[in-house]
Image (cartoon, rainbow, N blue to C red):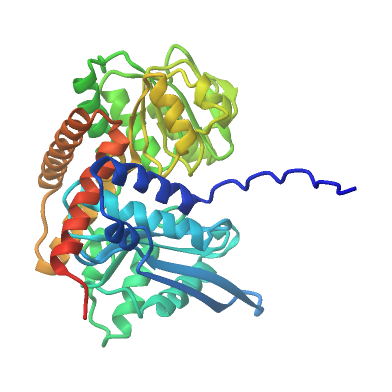
Amino acid sequence: MVVESPAQERPAPSLFDIAVEQFNIAADVVGLDDDMRRMLSVCKRELTVNFPVEMDDGTVQVFTGYRVQHSIAPGPSKGGIRYHPDVTLDEVKALAMWMTWKCAVVGLPYGGAKGGVRVNPKVLSQNELQNLTRRYTTEISVLIGPHSDIPAPDVNTNPQVMAWMLDTYSMHRGGVAIPAVVTGKPLLLGGSAGRLEATGRGCTIAIQEACKAYGITLPGARVVVQGFGNAGSTVAILLHQLGCRVVGVSDSRGGIYNPQGLDIPAVLEHKRQTKSVVGFPEADQVTNQELLELDCDILIPAALEEQITEANAPRIKARLIAEAANGPTTPDADRILNDRGVIVVPDIYANAGGVTVSYFEWVQGLQAFTWTEQEVHERLQRLMSEAFAAIHAVSEQYRVSLRTAALVRAILRVAEFTRVRGIYP
């Protein structure tokens, strides 16, 4: 007698699988040909580096890092560098693909890239962090450059890390500073005014545009923000200033909730002093998962990937979700939310403010000419508003979600660059 083995569970899709699935959904809408699908559904270059770093105690540790370029058809590739213990090549590939669409959806002359090092930077000293950054920069210097691939800050990296990258790259080329090689660097070294809060400001503009299009009154709207880092805290304070009632926020340690609304400036001060929003006295404690399911009008996932899934999507109460994080919603969750009529303002548009102002910074670096903060804000407002109008028009034309509409707009743009340039040789 033959005994059948129990059916094996289908492995969960990888982050890159999710990115490709989203791409194929949009490609189906516009009937993208098979040849173009094959070219755009893979990454052009994938670099893995393993490098030693001498620690403060004299021991040597070996770290693994990545730099991936998805496309360079529209121009130099652009994308952040993240330091996190869970960084994988698969994750970096997905983020690089999303960066291509993000740049295309707001009309920037960039392809997409991403980088990362598998490390917990919170356990490193400042000296160890500098050593790691300089060695990693050296390892990926075969790809990066002001006219080829421009890094920027991402999870657990900041202007100081970009300053070390700039200096390392510049020292390899004679020592004279080459400011356009990275963005998100300190103002002193050629950074742009308005860059630090650009992702959050851009997301706020996206929310304003979506609320106008879908008849949602912003003043008085109840808002929940998962992730109270740079982007999330900026969105929270800007929406608070616009008259929204921010009822819940969280960080990696947990969340806080007050249905009457949180005093966001006080929460910011509490986090500055304690390093977390947890313990804020005028609020109830909630978990990050509970926070996503709170009763609210606008939900802003501003943490990590795959936070809204098939499991919790049916319990999401928000009318509008604005993705300040990259990839916070899985395709299965997307379908559930769409069926329920929840408006999702997708990551490749909602968090494009950061790369847009990075583009402004890069242009300023190439020209050695700076813009005022007001000029930066006005240009960001114009590009984000124009991009939303275009995405909304595509959504209405094809009767698809905003995510698919944004991808359609981006894919058609990158496909046209690829088609017109042709295949070499």
Q: Is residue 28 above or below residue 269?
A: below
Q: Nearer the viewer, residue 301 or 38?
A: 38
Direction from residue 157 to residue 201 in the image, left or right = left
Quarter of the image where one finds residue 252: top right
Q: Is residue 247 above or below residue 238?
A: above
Q: Nearer the viewer, residue 154 or 46?
A: 46
The percent position of residue 98, horizontal first and vertical second, equals 35, 51
The percent position of residue 2, horizontal first and vertical second, equals 86, 49
Residue at coordinates 24% horizontally, 26% vertically from top-left? 210
The percent position of residue 31, horizontal first and vertical second, equals 25, 46
Direction from residue 425 to residue 185 in the image, left or right = right
Residue that lies at the very extreme toward the right in this rendered image? 1
The percent position of residue 235, horizontal first and vertical second, equals 33, 33
Q: Is residue 280 visible?
A: no
Residue at coordinates 33% horizontally, 16% vertically from top-left? 221
Q: Nearer the viewer, residue 207 or 332?
A: 332
Quarter of the image where one finds residue 62: bottom right
Q: Is residue 55 above or below residue 20?
A: below
Residue that lies at the very extreme toward the front in this rendered image? 1
Q: How many marks?
A: 0
**Quarter occupied by the C terminus:** bottom left
Quarter of the image where one finds residue 331: top left
Residue at coordinates 21% horizontally, 77% vertically from top-left? 424
Q: Is residue 286 visible?
A: yes
